Image: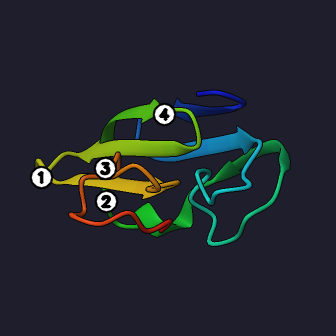
Amino acid sequence: GGAHNFALTADGAAWSWGEGSWGELGHGNEGEQLLPKKVEAFAGRRVVAVSAGDGHSIAITADGAAWSWGNGGWGQLGHGDQQHQ
């Protein structure tokens, strides 16, 4: 991403760190995370792919669901609006 990163573990957990001013880290807040932190929103789900964009993030879980969050000001989250989520 622009200033944030993700890592996936073998068991499908997603970890993120870096700049989170748009909520792109997935921790439910808008702030920096200086060390890798597990994204608890995926508890009970297996993440198989994740992409860090410029202020937003997208993940795919094993059941085929797509998840997006962060800066949606230009519709890049695909939610049909321009909200930050």
Please give the residue where the numbered disc 1 appears in the rendered image. 63
Q: Residue at x 50, y 65 (%)?
A: 84
- The image shows residue 71 at horizontal and vertical percentages of 52, 54
User: Does residue 61 sit above or below 79 in this rendering?
Assistant: above
Please give the residue where the numbered disc 2 appears in the rendered image. 45
Report how far apart the C-alphas of labels 4 and 2 lie in the structure: 12 Å
Q: Which mark is residue 46?
A: 3
Which three-letter amino acid code belongs to the residue tagged 1?
Asp
Question: Element under label 3?
Answer: loop
Please give the residue where the numbered disc 4 appears in the rendered image. 8
- Asked whether disc 1 touches disc 2, contact meaning CB atoms under 8 Å apart, the reply is yes
Q: Which mark is residue 50?
A: none
In this rendering, does residue 82 appear at all? yes
Which three-letter amino acid code belongs to the residue tagged 4?
Leu
In this rendering, does residue 12 appear at all? no
Report how far apart the C-alphas of labels 1 and 4 lie in the structure: 16 Å
Question: Element under label 1?
Answer: loop
Q: Nearer the viewer, residue 74 or 79?
A: 74
- The image shows residue 76 at horizontal and vertical percentages of 35, 45
